[in-house]
Amino acid sequence: MQLKKLLPIVAAAALLPSLGFAQDEALSADRVNSEMVFIMNTLLFLMGGFLVFFMAAGFCMLETGLVRSKNATMQLVKNVALFSLASVAYFVVGFNLMYPGDGWIVQGWMGGFSMTSLEPVGVGYDDLVDVTYASVGSDFIFQLMFCAATASIVSGAVAERIKLWPFLIFVVILTGLIYPIQASWSWGGGFLSEAGFSDFAGSSIVHSAGGWAALAGVLILGARTGKYGKDGRVTVMPGSNLPLATLGMFILWLGWFGFNGGSQLAMGTVSDVADVSRIFANTNTAAAGGAIAALILTQVLYKKVDLTMVLNGALAGLVSITAEPLAPGLGMATIIGAIGGVIVVFTVPLLDKLKIDDVVGAIPVHLFAGIWGTLAVVLSNSDATIGGQIYGIVAIGVFMFVVSAIVWFILKAVMGIRVSDEDQINGLDTSELGMEAYPEFSNR
Amino acid sequence: MQLKKLLPIVAAAALLPSLGFAQDEALSADRVNSEMVFIMNTLLFLMGGFLVFFMAAGFCMLETGLVRSKNATMQLVKNVALFSLASVAYFVVGFNLMYPGDGWIVQGWMGGFSMTSLEPVGVGYDDLVDVTYASVGSDFIFQLMFCAATASIVSGAVAERIKLWPFLIFVVILTGLIYPIQASWSWGGGFLSEAGFSDFAGSSIVHSAGGWAALAGVLILGARTGKYGKDGRVTVMPGSNLPLATLGMFILWLGWFGFNGGSQLAMGTVSDVADVSRIFANTNTAAAGGAIAALILTQVLYKKVDLTMVLNGALAGLVSITAEPLAPGLGMATIIGAIGGVIVVFTVPLLDKLKIDDVVGAIPVHLFAGIWGTLAVVLSNSDATIGGQIYGIVAIGVFMFVVSAIVWFILKAVMGIRVSDEDQINGLDTSELGMEAYPEFSNR
Amino acid sequence: MQLKKLLPIVAAAALLPSLGFAQDEALSADRVNSEMVFIMNTLLFLMGGFLVFFMAAGFCMLETGLVRSKNATMQLVKNVALFSLASVAYFVVGFNLMYPGDGWIVQGWMGGFSMTSLEPVGVGYDDLVDVTYASVGSDFIFQLMFCAATASIVSGAVAERIKLWPFLIFVVILTGLIYPIQASWSWGGGFLSEAGFSDFAGSSIVHSAGGWAALAGVLILGARTGKYGKDGRVTVMPGSNLPLATLGMFILWLGWFGFNGGSQLAMGTVSDVADVSRIFANTNTAAAGGAIAALILTQVLYKKVDLTMVLNGALAGLVSITAEPLAPGLGMATIIGAIGGVIVVFTVPLLDKLKIDDVVGAIPVHLFAGIWGTLAVVLSNSDATIGGQIYGIVAIGVFMFVVSAIVWFILKAVMGIRVSDEDQINGLDTSELGMEAYPEFSNR
């Protein structure tokens, strides 16, 4: 607390930060080192936490820039609300469900239910939960951000025609139950981790998982009114604010340093911090590779560069490297990312042909590139097998898609999830919220 | 300096970063630990510093998004200028006035006047001002950001009708004198710190203080022309760019990890870094609580979710937890934040009934939720008493309101503070600056 | 990898982060200290890396806000693409060309060609390239961001009339070859470092270098169609989105803490971390000085504050302090920054008189203030001489300008670099990309 700051006057001895040990006993170097490891690991999570937190803003800006202005306020509301609800759902049930320790209900498949408790204020060295790891609070805040990202992925795909409250109820179930159970299989020590499935920072566990939930939603919800004509014509519905979308992409790229770098889970030794550095470098170059691939490919295919493809190409590069950002060299990482960018350029129009209406390209970026990235682990990590990777991809995909679909169906049956055609034409901001995002600008 | 980077050729021994000690004497573990504590504490301030710095951008975007486009350039100018002026005022007088050490003019009430001096370049261990704390430069940069935040709070409340230069003169006085004197009472070791008043990161010392200064300004300045009709009708003047306002809110939320986390003032021991982690987790969940409360409450009260209330709800949650982000558990922190959100939803319309025209809701968010947060300390921190908290709230409130009012009155008498009705109708950007924020967009 | 997280069930001993040493041999305090230095230095680069990365977004928003809306998408594409291409060019050739170690082709003047290799995964203490410095990956990511910034500077100056692909080819050559060769002269241990030239974080090496490349481009490219009439009239072409430009400035200011602070290259000792703190404080106050100077000067000269001058004033303050952010005190740093702001206010109109069409003011901010900052080193750093500084400025200037001009000329001859008058009038977004940035807003 800030009071510590001053001192000579007040009882300084009591207020000053202690050196961590009673001053009258000499420290051992081992103990100092051990404290340093704990502090640095915790710091990695805190830094990763705030960087990945900012991705919530990145998703929000990306999506709001890519919807039409008549639906922009709704997209803002959804993004602020989904992050807030995820924050609460994850501490109430998600975190301990995802990391059950010894408390599995069904061993390796389904954790238990309890609220998150942080370590006590001023916890001492001897009372730490795990002195070789990091503080519970830092771990919680870092993992929460991954959980919330899953919901952000869904938000973009179902934009411009979903009702607010059913979407938010889905978010609570996704972030409180569905994602944590699935993630426990790998990161909580469940059956996938024992099966040799390898997904460093979540190409599948976070990104394709979110993509599957989004795909289920998009299919059950249907396309936006007017998007696909009966004659097979696809109506282009351009994003209303591309600078905002670009800003969102840059914020996501920034946050990804924390997303992948923090997933090293340690930086208290020279080898861990050097590994975090490798991850930073590979993450960056994969994003670059994805953007460049989309840049060149749209020029070649369409004779004009397509900014939204470039943005999604960069994001697909990031998703692709997320399953293994450590092992590749810079050249390999660039190629892995570039292939992610290629996937986006080819699958965005494919979805339109299938009349699957994904407003922001979330399914190509997170689901398709996420699967690619998960498979690409075998290119550089000799511990991974193609069989193990496919096993994980399928297990996660089936679970996420089926359970999400069930929830979407129930929400559809109980309260309806789709905004009426008329309200869509007027815009969700007017019909659902009564508040325009740009009341003075729009010329429509 | 970057030259260090190279090496074999040039005299590497002289250029390479030294290990902090002459290499020919063995180090003690105590000494290594002591250095580590200093380095980590300093790093906390540097990270807190850049995070809270970014809040200046957050306030700027929030406020600019919430004013009408004809006043947006003015809001941008004010925010860049206020931060710049605060930066200079704080080093010239504010910092040492706030932390007088032994140099009080009136013991515990009024510090002394001197410019900030940083530690010398390459300061050695033995020459450090306080080896158990952190570097002076890092402390300065961190505390400066709090001071500037106070001015940002005022900026939003008085928007759309205040003249530029009187506002900037007020900012210089606020950040150079008023805030530092008030803050010295608690954080500088003054009479409030001795009275047991507890305000960890500034629910009152920063937020309600800024809110009182804003309230004084709003009352003396009067409402925007046309805001309140003689028949009691309130004219809604919607914000022109809600995505920008939402971005601003997210940036503020991000910065708050530094605001509250950095206020632990130490992370060089396992217990300090675990406490910083607790603070991160509680800060986040309080914001979520505030947003969710406003989300649900506006749905219930108005049948439609109100985005600006949700944004201000999140901010009110953050303000509410700021006085005690360490002691509560996650559940308690969520509730404290949620009550902040409730306060916003009920007091924003209340101010309109009282014809107090606060453009962005700064008074509900920073003043009312700040008072709530200061009182809420007693819920989790047994060292705090309701009497001590009220004493601090009142002392800060009376001082900030009265002194601010005096300054506003003098400025009004000497040079006028209010833009004419006609110029308000044309917009401050045209009348005062001759530069439109969106010259190609506005349809008004 | 996240799997580490769990534990009791799986073979925890193998998965948990090791303490960096075999636990059965006691550590020496020297060794612990040495590890700490390496970890903290690396962390400084990682933090500096992500902060300076974000400057890519800052440049992008600044420039996009300052162009007309009909060219905004193009500016977004260029900024995303230039950063991506720089990322690849720098690892393929730039990094090792800039830091040749013993591998110069022409000693002190021209390094060698090889791709960047990172340290191996899980590198051990004894295998580190330089245990007294930092990990290669962190160094690479930090230095890459400086290289990319050089290209961002060019992007703004040549906006609104340059063709996309010639620009991107220039970027590849600039970031892969021109910048790294020039930077090797100082930071790679080349002839300028031996001549006593001092440029801490790159007022000349990055900023004036980028400014010279931009100037060459602007001169060869010519002014925007319609900018300068035959009668000497200058047509004002106001920026379309000033809030976006202001956000960009704030992001750049934020990133500059990493830019200058990270250039200390070390924070593993108390004196290094205290120096980083000094740099943070000086960097901030110089920006403030630049903004305030432009604020007051435009009021005095034009009777109205000019926001774009204030933004560029802050940036010029930052550029000015970059050559020596450590040695000055706060007062001196403020003055150095303020003079940068003054330079901007006087040279922006001067360029217009010379019919040099620099869209965003990049040449005043980065070239002119960069030269000023490089000269200002002698005010506080007694190791620098005015002769040495001028030598560096001239050497860098001649090389950057001449080589850039040659490249621009070749591009002009081979493929053309300028968009036709008609396409400029219609806007590059429509003519070159077929995608509007704000399809629903623009009233032009």
Image (tube, coloured by chain):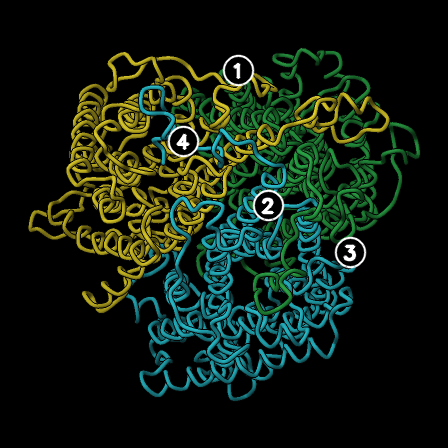
Chain colours: A cyan, B yellow, C green
- CB atoms of marks 4 and 1 within 8 Å: no
Name the disc covering residue B83, or none.
4
User: Mark 2 or mark 3, which is nearer the start of the sequence?
Assistant: 2
Q: Determine whether the residue tagged by mark 2 lies in a helix, strand or loop.
A: helix
Separation (CA) of disc 4 from disc 1: 19 Å
x%, y% of residue B384? 23, 39
Is C392 positioned to the left or the right of A317 in the image? right
Tell me the kind of residue under disc 1. Answer: Met
Q: How many marks?
A: 4
Towards the viewer: C373 or C311 = C373
Residue pictured at 34% horizontal, 36% vertical: B152
**Crowd class of label 4 (few under 14; some 14 to 19; many from 20; radius 10 Å):** many
Name the disc covering residue A50, or none.
none
Separation (CA) of disc 3 from disc 2: 27 Å
Which residue is the site of mark 2?
A37
Which is more foreground, mark 1 or mark 2? 2
Which is more foreground, mark 2 or mark 4? 2
Separation (CA) of disc 1 from disc 3: 45 Å
Separation (CA) of disc 2 from disc 4: 37 Å
Would you place residue C300 above or below residue B215 in this image? Answer: above
Q: Quadrant of the N terminus of chain B?
A: top right
Which residue is the site of mark 1?
C332
Please say whether residue A435 is visible from this viewpoint. yes
Is C264 positioned to the left or the right of A108 in the image? right
Tell me the kind of residue under disc 3. Answer: Gly
Name the disc covering residue A329, or none.
3
Marked residue chain, label 3? A
Which is more foreground, mark 3 or mark 2? 2
Tell me the kind of residue under disc 4. Answer: Phe
Residue pictured at 52% horizontal, 38% vertical: C254
Would you place residue A207 above or below residue C370 in this image? Answer: below
